[in-house]
Image (cartoon, grey):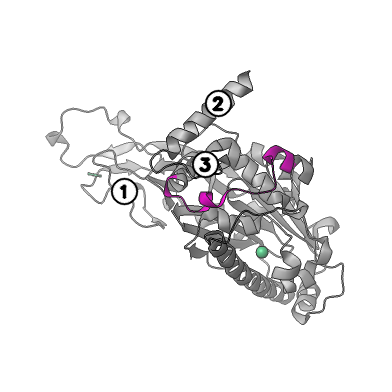
Amino acid sequence: MKFVSAQEIFKQAGSRKGLPAWTYNNDELTRLEMEQVFLRNWIFIGHVSDLPNSGDYQCFAMADERAVVVRDQDGQLRAFHNVCRHRASRVVGDDKGHCGKAFICPFHGWSYNLDGSLKNIPKTDAFPEIDKSQFGLKSLDCEVWQGMIFIRFGGEGPAVAELFAEAAEEIGLYRIEEMQPLDKPYQYNFDLDWKAVLDIDNEGYHVPVGHPELFDLVGASYTDQPLEGGLNRSVGVINQRKHRLERNRDYVAALPQDSYLPESHQNLWIYWGLFPGFVLTLFPDQIEIYQIYPTGNQKSVMAGVTYALPDKRAEMQKARELNRDINMDVGNEDIRLVQWAAEGMRSSAFDEVLLSDLELGIGSFQNRLREVLPVVTLDQEPEVGSLQEENERLQSQASVAAVG
Ligand code: FES
Ligand SMILES: [Fe+2]
Protein backbone atom coordinates (compact mmCIF):
# COMPACT_ATOMS: atom_id res chain seq x y z
CA MET A 1 0.00 0.00 0.00
CA LYS A 2 1.28 3.44 -0.91
CA PHE A 3 0.55 5.97 1.81
CA VAL A 4 0.56 9.74 1.35
CA SER A 5 2.35 11.96 3.84
CA ALA A 6 0.80 14.91 5.65
CA GLN A 7 3.34 17.13 3.93
CA GLU A 8 2.18 16.08 0.46
CA ILE A 9 -1.47 16.46 1.41
CA PHE A 10 -1.15 19.95 2.83
CA LYS A 11 1.13 21.01 -0.02
CA GLN A 12 -1.60 20.05 -2.46
CA ALA A 13 -4.20 21.79 -0.29
CA GLY A 14 -2.12 24.97 -0.34
CA SER A 15 -2.61 25.51 3.40
CA ARG A 16 -3.64 23.87 6.65
CA LYS A 17 -6.72 26.04 6.97
CA GLY A 18 -9.24 23.44 5.93
CA LEU A 19 -12.35 24.48 4.05
CA PRO A 20 -13.74 27.95 4.74
CA ALA A 21 -16.61 28.10 7.24
CA TRP A 22 -19.19 29.14 4.61
CA THR A 23 -18.81 25.75 2.90
CA TYR A 24 -20.38 24.16 5.98
CA ASN A 25 -23.57 26.19 5.70
CA ASN A 26 -24.60 26.89 2.13
CA ASP A 27 -27.73 25.59 0.52
CA GLU A 28 -26.48 25.80 -3.06
CA LEU A 29 -23.25 24.01 -2.21
CA THR A 30 -25.11 21.19 -0.48
CA ARG A 31 -27.22 20.74 -3.58
CA LEU A 32 -24.11 20.59 -5.76
CA GLU A 33 -22.44 18.15 -3.36
CA MET A 34 -25.41 15.84 -3.65
CA GLU A 35 -25.57 16.08 -7.44
CA GLN A 36 -21.89 16.16 -8.35
CA VAL A 37 -20.31 14.23 -5.51
CA PHE A 38 -22.73 11.69 -4.09
CA LEU A 39 -24.84 10.99 -7.16
CA ARG A 40 -21.67 10.46 -9.22
CA ASN A 41 -19.96 8.16 -6.78
CA TRP A 42 -20.79 4.75 -5.37
CA ILE A 43 -23.42 4.59 -2.65
CA PHE A 44 -23.58 1.63 -0.29
CA ILE A 45 -27.01 0.01 -0.23
CA GLY A 46 -26.58 -3.08 1.90
CA HIS A 47 -25.16 -6.55 2.12
CA VAL A 48 -26.09 -9.48 -0.11
CA SER A 49 -27.74 -11.14 2.90
CA ASP A 50 -30.11 -8.16 3.26
CA LEU A 51 -31.76 -9.20 -0.03
CA PRO A 52 -31.62 -13.01 0.07
CA ASN A 53 -34.60 -13.87 -2.14
CA SER A 54 -35.74 -13.01 -5.60
CA GLY A 55 -38.14 -10.06 -5.29
CA ASP A 56 -36.45 -8.61 -2.18
CA TYR A 57 -35.78 -4.93 -2.69
CA GLN A 58 -34.15 -1.97 -0.97
CA CYS A 59 -34.52 1.73 -1.85
CA PHE A 60 -32.32 4.78 -1.58
CA ALA A 61 -33.19 8.42 -2.30
CA MET A 62 -31.10 11.56 -2.55
CA ALA A 63 -31.92 15.02 -3.94
CA ASP A 64 -34.34 14.37 -6.83
CA GLU A 65 -33.19 10.81 -7.43
CA ARG A 66 -34.73 7.58 -6.20
CA ALA A 67 -33.34 4.10 -6.63
CA VAL A 68 -34.52 0.58 -6.01
CA VAL A 69 -32.20 -2.42 -5.84
CA VAL A 70 -33.81 -5.82 -6.35
CA ARG A 71 -32.73 -9.43 -6.54
CA ASP A 72 -34.06 -10.72 -9.85
CA GLN A 73 -35.33 -14.18 -10.71
CA ASP A 74 -31.85 -15.37 -11.66
CA GLY A 75 -30.48 -14.25 -8.32
CA GLN A 76 -28.70 -11.23 -9.76
CA LEU A 77 -28.87 -7.87 -8.00
CA ARG A 78 -30.03 -5.02 -10.20
CA ALA A 79 -30.62 -1.33 -9.61
CA PHE A 80 -33.20 0.91 -11.27
CA HIS A 81 -34.58 4.39 -10.96
CA ASN A 82 -37.64 3.99 -8.77
CA VAL A 83 -39.64 6.02 -11.28
CA CYS A 84 -42.57 4.61 -13.22
CA ARG A 85 -42.39 5.12 -16.98
CA HIS A 86 -46.07 6.10 -17.09
CA ARG A 87 -46.38 9.18 -14.89
CA ALA A 88 -43.32 8.93 -12.66
CA SER A 89 -44.74 7.51 -9.45
CA ARG A 90 -42.48 5.39 -7.29
CA VAL A 91 -42.98 1.78 -8.34
CA VAL A 92 -42.35 0.74 -4.74
CA GLY A 93 -43.21 3.02 -1.87
CA ASP A 94 -41.57 1.29 1.08
CA ASP A 95 -37.88 1.64 1.84
CA LYS A 96 -37.41 -2.10 1.88
CA GLY A 97 -39.57 -5.12 1.20
CA HIS A 98 -40.53 -7.94 -1.11
CA CYS A 99 -42.38 -7.41 -4.36
CA GLY A 100 -42.91 -10.99 -5.54
CA LYS A 101 -42.31 -11.57 -9.23
CA ALA A 102 -42.92 -8.01 -10.41
CA PHE A 103 -43.07 -4.39 -9.38
CA ILE A 104 -46.66 -3.15 -9.68
CA CYS A 105 -46.85 0.61 -9.73
CA PRO A 106 -49.26 1.76 -7.00
CA PHE A 107 -50.67 4.57 -9.18
CA HIS A 108 -52.27 2.91 -12.24
CA GLY A 109 -50.80 -0.58 -12.02
CA TRP A 110 -48.17 -0.72 -14.73
CA SER A 111 -46.03 -3.72 -13.87
CA TYR A 112 -42.35 -4.42 -14.38
CA ASN A 113 -40.40 -7.67 -14.33
CA LEU A 114 -37.51 -7.91 -11.90
CA ASP A 115 -35.09 -7.33 -14.79
CA GLY A 116 -36.78 -3.94 -15.22
CA SER A 117 -38.63 -4.76 -18.44
CA LEU A 118 -42.22 -3.58 -18.77
CA LYS A 119 -44.56 -6.49 -18.14
CA ASN A 120 -48.08 -5.21 -18.42
CA ILE A 121 -50.13 -2.06 -18.89
CA PRO A 122 -53.69 -2.20 -17.52
CA LYS A 123 -56.30 -1.24 -20.15
CA THR A 124 -53.58 -1.22 -22.72
CA ASP A 125 -56.12 -0.53 -25.51
CA ALA A 126 -56.54 2.97 -24.14
CA PHE A 127 -52.99 3.79 -25.21
CA PRO A 128 -51.72 4.19 -28.73
CA GLU A 129 -49.55 1.27 -29.79
CA ILE A 130 -46.25 1.48 -27.92
CA ASP A 131 -43.01 -0.43 -28.13
CA LYS A 132 -42.93 -2.06 -24.69
CA SER A 133 -39.20 -2.65 -24.91
CA GLN A 134 -38.70 1.11 -24.72
CA PHE A 135 -40.63 1.48 -21.48
CA GLY A 136 -38.68 -0.59 -18.97
CA LEU A 137 -37.43 0.91 -15.72
CA LYS A 138 -34.23 2.87 -16.30
CA SER A 139 -31.28 0.99 -14.91
CA LEU A 140 -28.48 2.22 -12.66
CA ASP A 141 -24.95 0.95 -12.12
CA CYS A 142 -24.93 -1.78 -9.49
CA GLU A 143 -21.85 -3.60 -8.23
CA VAL A 144 -21.48 -6.24 -5.58
CA TRP A 145 -18.00 -6.28 -4.10
CA GLN A 146 -17.04 -8.69 -1.32
CA GLY A 147 -20.70 -9.08 -0.39
CA MET A 148 -21.42 -5.36 -0.26
CA ILE A 149 -23.91 -3.82 -2.71
CA PHE A 150 -23.18 -0.43 -4.22
CA ILE A 151 -25.13 1.64 -6.73
CA ARG A 152 -24.24 4.72 -8.75
CA PHE A 153 -26.65 7.20 -10.29
CA GLY A 154 -24.17 8.64 -12.77
CA GLY A 155 -20.53 9.42 -13.38
CA GLU A 156 -17.95 7.33 -15.09
CA GLY A 157 -15.35 6.71 -12.45
CA PRO A 158 -13.71 3.39 -11.62
CA ALA A 159 -15.57 0.31 -10.41
CA VAL A 160 -15.79 -0.34 -6.66
CA ALA A 161 -13.35 -3.24 -7.06
CA GLU A 162 -10.84 -0.90 -8.67
CA LEU A 163 -11.25 1.78 -6.01
CA PHE A 164 -10.68 -0.78 -3.29
CA ALA A 165 -7.92 -2.64 -5.15
CA GLU A 166 -5.22 -1.84 -2.59
CA ALA A 167 -7.47 -2.91 0.28
CA ALA A 168 -8.86 -6.04 -1.36
CA GLU A 169 -6.41 -8.48 0.12
CA GLU A 170 -6.92 -7.25 3.66
CA ILE A 171 -10.70 -6.89 3.41
CA GLY A 172 -10.88 -10.32 1.77
CA LEU A 173 -9.55 -11.90 4.98
CA TYR A 174 -12.82 -11.10 6.72
CA ARG A 175 -15.09 -13.18 4.41
CA ILE A 176 -17.69 -10.43 4.37
CA GLU A 177 -19.78 -12.11 1.67
CA GLU A 178 -20.51 -14.97 4.09
CA MET A 179 -21.67 -12.66 6.89
CA GLN A 180 -25.18 -12.07 8.20
CA PRO A 181 -26.74 -8.93 9.71
CA LEU A 182 -25.92 -8.64 13.43
CA ASP A 183 -27.74 -5.68 14.97
CA LYS A 184 -30.57 -3.63 13.53
CA PRO A 185 -29.40 -0.81 11.23
CA TYR A 186 -29.12 2.56 12.96
CA GLN A 187 -29.53 6.07 11.67
CA TYR A 188 -28.56 9.39 13.22
CA ASN A 189 -30.10 12.51 11.74
CA PHE A 190 -27.94 15.59 12.25
CA ASP A 191 -28.92 19.24 11.91
CA LEU A 192 -25.42 19.78 10.60
CA ASP A 193 -23.54 19.81 7.34
CA TRP A 194 -22.38 16.32 6.33
CA LYS A 195 -18.74 17.48 6.15
CA ALA A 196 -18.84 18.53 9.81
CA VAL A 197 -19.87 15.00 10.71
CA LEU A 198 -17.31 13.43 8.42
CA ASP A 199 -14.40 15.61 9.57
CA ILE A 200 -14.33 14.04 13.02
CA ASP A 201 -14.28 10.67 11.39
CA ASN A 202 -11.33 11.52 9.20
CA GLU A 203 -8.86 12.08 11.99
CA GLY A 204 -7.56 10.25 15.03
CA TYR A 205 -5.98 13.29 16.69
CA HIS A 206 -9.10 13.58 18.87
CA VAL A 207 -8.96 9.99 20.12
CA PRO A 208 -6.74 10.44 23.24
CA VAL A 209 -8.85 13.29 24.63
CA GLY A 210 -12.24 12.91 22.92
CA HIS A 211 -12.50 9.14 23.44
CA PRO A 212 -10.66 8.25 26.67
CA GLU A 213 -12.09 4.74 26.70
CA LEU A 214 -11.21 4.00 23.11
CA PHE A 215 -7.77 5.43 23.78
CA ASP A 216 -7.41 3.05 26.70
CA LEU A 217 -8.10 0.24 24.23
CA VAL A 218 -5.83 1.21 21.34
CA GLY A 219 -3.42 3.72 22.88
CA ALA A 220 -0.89 5.47 20.70
CA SER A 221 -1.09 2.68 18.13
CA TYR A 222 -4.03 4.46 16.49
CA THR A 223 -2.92 5.93 13.15
CA ASP A 224 -4.54 7.40 10.06
CA GLN A 225 -3.07 6.34 6.74
CA PRO A 226 -4.45 8.02 3.62
CA LEU A 227 -3.52 6.11 0.48
CA GLU A 228 -2.39 7.52 -2.83
CA GLY A 229 -5.41 6.09 -4.61
CA GLY A 230 -7.82 8.07 -2.42
CA LEU A 231 -8.73 5.45 0.17
CA ASN A 232 -8.18 6.14 3.85
CA ARG A 233 -7.07 3.49 6.29
CA SER A 234 -7.02 3.94 10.05
CA VAL A 235 -5.83 1.29 12.39
CA GLY A 236 -5.54 0.64 16.12
CA VAL A 237 -4.00 -2.33 17.92
CA ILE A 238 -6.10 -3.57 20.85
CA ASN A 239 -3.73 -5.84 22.76
CA GLN A 240 -0.56 -3.78 23.08
CA ARG A 241 -1.13 -2.14 26.41
CA LYS A 242 -2.32 -2.82 29.90
CA HIS A 243 -5.92 -1.63 29.82
CA ARG A 244 -7.04 0.54 32.69
CA LEU A 245 -10.72 -0.14 32.03
CA GLU A 246 -12.34 -3.41 32.88
CA ARG A 247 -14.59 -3.32 29.82
CA ASN A 248 -11.58 -3.13 27.52
CA ARG A 249 -9.83 -5.94 29.36
CA ASP A 250 -12.98 -8.05 29.15
CA TYR A 251 -13.40 -7.35 25.45
CA VAL A 252 -9.87 -8.38 24.51
CA ALA A 253 -10.10 -11.44 26.78
CA ALA A 254 -13.46 -12.48 25.31
CA LEU A 255 -12.18 -12.61 21.72
CA PRO A 256 -11.90 -16.33 20.94
CA GLN A 257 -8.39 -17.64 20.49
CA ASP A 258 -9.18 -19.72 17.42
CA SER A 259 -10.10 -16.90 15.08
CA TYR A 260 -10.60 -17.43 11.36
CA LEU A 261 -8.39 -14.41 10.82
CA PRO A 262 -4.63 -14.67 10.42
CA GLU A 263 -2.67 -13.69 13.51
CA SER A 264 -1.73 -10.35 11.93
CA HIS A 265 -5.39 -9.24 12.08
CA GLN A 266 -6.71 -10.80 15.28
CA ASN A 267 -6.05 -7.71 17.36
CA LEU A 268 -6.68 -4.86 14.98
CA TRP A 269 -9.50 -2.39 14.63
CA ILE A 270 -9.31 -1.19 11.04
CA TYR A 271 -11.33 1.53 9.36
CA TRP A 272 -11.38 1.79 5.56
CA GLY A 273 -12.85 5.02 4.20
CA LEU A 274 -13.90 5.61 0.61
CA PHE A 275 -14.67 9.09 -0.72
CA PRO A 276 -17.07 10.70 -0.14
CA GLY A 277 -18.67 9.23 2.99
CA PHE A 278 -18.36 5.44 3.17
CA VAL A 279 -16.60 3.68 6.06
CA LEU A 280 -16.02 -0.04 6.53
CA THR A 281 -14.80 -1.00 9.99
CA LEU A 282 -13.16 -4.37 10.45
CA PHE A 283 -13.15 -5.78 13.96
CA PRO A 284 -11.94 -9.26 14.90
CA ASP A 285 -15.50 -10.13 15.98
CA GLN A 286 -17.72 -8.31 13.47
CA ILE A 287 -17.75 -5.56 10.88
CA GLU A 288 -19.60 -2.27 10.80
CA ILE A 289 -20.43 -0.30 7.68
CA TYR A 290 -21.68 3.24 7.78
CA GLN A 291 -22.22 6.08 5.45
CA ILE A 292 -22.42 9.81 6.05
CA TYR A 293 -24.29 11.90 3.49
CA PRO A 294 -26.22 15.14 3.12
CA THR A 295 -29.99 15.28 3.06
CA GLY A 296 -30.27 19.07 2.85
CA ASN A 297 -28.60 22.26 4.00
CA GLN A 298 -27.51 21.70 7.60
CA LYS A 299 -29.07 18.25 7.40
CA SER A 300 -27.16 15.01 7.21
CA VAL A 301 -27.44 11.38 8.04
CA MET A 302 -25.10 8.78 9.43
CA ALA A 303 -26.56 5.37 8.66
CA GLY A 304 -24.85 2.20 9.80
CA VAL A 305 -25.23 -1.51 10.12
CA THR A 306 -23.21 -4.41 11.55
CA TYR A 307 -22.56 -7.86 10.10
CA ALA A 308 -20.77 -10.94 11.37
CA LEU A 309 -20.11 -14.55 10.56
CA PRO A 310 -22.52 -16.89 12.32
CA ASP A 311 -20.82 -17.83 15.61
CA LYS A 312 -22.72 -19.08 18.63
CA ARG A 313 -19.78 -19.34 21.04
CA ALA A 314 -20.52 -17.62 24.33
CA GLU A 315 -17.22 -15.75 24.35
CA MET A 316 -17.88 -14.41 20.87
CA GLN A 317 -21.34 -13.23 21.92
CA LYS A 318 -19.72 -11.46 24.85
CA ALA A 319 -17.03 -9.86 22.68
CA ARG A 320 -19.71 -8.60 20.26
CA GLU A 321 -21.76 -7.15 23.08
CA LEU A 322 -18.76 -5.35 24.58
CA ASN A 323 -17.71 -4.09 21.15
CA ARG A 324 -21.22 -2.67 20.72
CA ASP A 325 -21.02 -0.90 24.09
CA ILE A 326 -17.58 0.54 23.41
CA ASN A 327 -18.60 1.84 20.00
CA MET A 328 -21.91 3.20 21.28
CA ASP A 329 -19.97 5.38 23.72
CA VAL A 330 -17.51 6.45 21.04
CA GLY A 331 -20.43 7.39 18.78
CA ASN A 332 -22.11 9.46 21.48
CA GLU A 333 -18.86 11.26 22.25
CA ASP A 334 -18.42 12.04 18.55
CA ILE A 335 -21.96 13.39 18.24
CA ARG A 336 -21.35 15.87 21.05
CA LEU A 337 -17.98 16.98 19.68
CA VAL A 338 -19.28 17.34 16.14
CA GLN A 339 -22.13 19.47 17.43
CA TRP A 340 -19.85 21.78 19.40
CA ALA A 341 -17.32 22.22 16.59
CA ALA A 342 -20.04 22.92 14.02
CA GLU A 343 -21.73 25.46 16.31
CA GLY A 344 -18.40 27.19 16.79
CA MET A 345 -17.80 27.48 13.06
CA ARG A 346 -21.00 29.54 12.79
CA SER A 347 -19.89 31.89 15.57
CA SER A 348 -18.54 35.40 14.88
CA ALA A 349 -15.45 34.35 16.86
CA PHE A 350 -14.43 31.71 14.33
CA ASP A 351 -11.64 32.56 11.89
CA GLU A 352 -10.30 29.37 10.39
CA VAL A 353 -9.10 25.96 11.48
CA LEU A 354 -5.49 24.85 11.69
CA LEU A 355 -4.92 21.23 10.73
CA SER A 356 -2.10 19.20 12.23
CA ASP A 357 -0.17 16.32 10.65
CA LEU A 358 -2.46 14.07 12.68
CA GLU A 359 -5.46 15.45 10.81
CA LEU A 360 -4.12 14.50 7.39
CA GLY A 361 -7.23 12.44 6.66
CA ILE A 362 -9.29 15.65 6.68
CA GLY A 363 -6.73 17.25 4.35
CA SER A 364 -6.88 14.32 1.98
CA PHE A 365 -10.70 14.26 1.93
CA GLN A 366 -10.86 18.00 1.35
CA ASN A 367 -8.37 17.76 -1.53
CA ARG A 368 -10.71 15.31 -3.23
CA LEU A 369 -13.61 17.67 -2.72
CA ARG A 370 -11.62 20.63 -4.04
CA GLU A 371 -10.90 18.69 -7.22
CA VAL A 372 -14.57 17.98 -7.87
CA LEU A 373 -15.97 21.26 -6.58
CA PRO A 374 -13.28 23.96 -6.86
CA VAL A 375 -15.78 26.54 -5.62
CA VAL A 376 -14.99 25.35 -2.08
CA THR A 377 -11.54 26.93 -2.42
CA LEU A 378 -13.03 30.43 -2.39
CA ASP A 379 -12.52 32.30 0.86
CA GLN A 380 -15.69 34.28 0.33
CA GLU A 381 -19.11 32.76 -0.12
CA PRO A 382 -20.35 33.30 -3.70
CA GLU A 383 -23.37 35.57 -4.06
CA VAL A 384 -26.72 33.86 -3.71
CA GLY A 385 -27.67 32.20 -6.99
CA SER A 386 -24.15 32.22 -8.45
CA LEU A 387 -22.45 29.24 -6.82
CA GLN A 388 -22.98 26.72 -9.57
CA GLU A 389 -21.85 29.14 -12.25
CA GLU A 390 -18.82 30.09 -10.19
CA ASN A 391 -17.96 26.44 -9.77
CA GLU A 392 -18.19 25.84 -13.52
CA ARG A 393 -15.94 28.83 -14.15
CA LEU A 394 -13.32 27.43 -11.77
CA GLN A 395 -13.67 23.96 -13.27
CA SER A 396 -12.99 25.23 -16.77
CA GLN A 397 -10.06 27.30 -15.49
CA ALA A 398 -8.62 24.16 -13.93
CA SER A 399 -9.04 22.11 -17.10
CA VAL A 400 -7.41 24.84 -19.19
CA ALA A 401 -4.51 24.88 -16.72
CA ALA A 402 -4.26 21.08 -16.88
CA VAL A 403 -4.15 21.11 -20.70
CA GLY A 404 -1.66 24.01 -20.71
S1 FES B 1 -47.55 6.30 -12.70
FE1 FES B 1 -47.12 4.23 -12.60
S2 FES B 1 -48.77 3.31 -13.51
FE2 FES B 1 -49.21 5.37 -13.71
FE1 LIG C 1 -14.31 10.02 17.10
Q: Earlier in the sequence, mark 1 or mark 2?
A: 1
The residue labelled by disc 3 is 37
Residue at image x 41%, y 38%? 386
Please identify, in this view, whether the residue under mark 1 or under mark 2 is nearer the observer: 2
Q: Position of residue 129 (x, y in %)?
A: 18, 27
Quarter of the view holding residue 160: top right
Q: Which residues are magenta?
A: 9-28
- Measured along the vertical axis of the image, is residue 248 above or below residue 298? below
At mark 3, the secondary structure is helix
Q: Earlier in the sequence, mark 1 or mark 3?
A: 3
Q: Are marks 1 and 3 in contact (CB under 8 Å)?
A: no
The residue labelled by disc 2 is 397
The residue labelled by disc 1 is 90
Q: Is residue 151 magenta?
A: no
Distance from Cα at disc 1 to Cα at disc 3: 24 Å
Q: In the image, what residue type sits under mark 1?
A: Arg
Q: In the image, what residue type sits under mark 3?
A: Val
Residue at image x 83%, y 76%? 243
In the visual, does 297 lie left or right of 316? Answer: left
